[in-house]
Image (cartoon, helix red, strand yellow):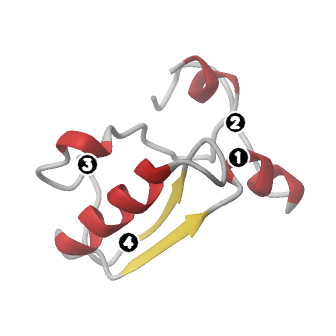
Amino acid sequence: AAAFARGRIPGAVRVDGRDLGALPKGVEGAAEIFVVGTGPNDASRRRLALALVGLGVRRVTELPGGMAEWEQLGLPLESGVTGS
């Protein structure tokens, strides 16, 4: 939660993949969802991506390098507790 508040992808929703029984509020199957873990060894990233596909999301992209990869690509970030 602290890392999420420090910096996240604009519009990101923090989800715990262990108990994902439905799509997060406001997310539809046609949405493009980026699954960002803590880094290359974060096994929960793959579990969450597969769970989302199982719930009908058609466009799921995993970032194996975590937020470091997002930042390295120069993509936008937002911070603070809003949107978490």
The residue carrying mark 4 is 31
Q: Secondary structure at mark 4?
A: loop
Q: Is residue 73 above or below residue 9?
A: below
48 left or right of 74 in image: left
**Label 1 or label 3, whichever comes before in sequence order:** 3
Question: What residue is pinned by disc 1?
Answer: 67
**Pointer 2: what residue?**
78
Amino acid carrying label 4: it is Ala
From the top left corner, tell me how far across and down residue 76 is, in percent: 77, 51
Q: Earlier in the sequence, mark 2 or mark 3?
A: 3
What is the x, y in percent for residue 5? 60, 22
Q: CA distance from mark 2 to mark 3?
A: 20 Å
**Circle 3 SS class:** loop
* Residue type, numbered disc 2: Glu
**Where is 84 relative to 12, above or below?**
above
Based on the displayed image, in which of its 4 quarters is residue 54 positioned?
Answer: bottom left
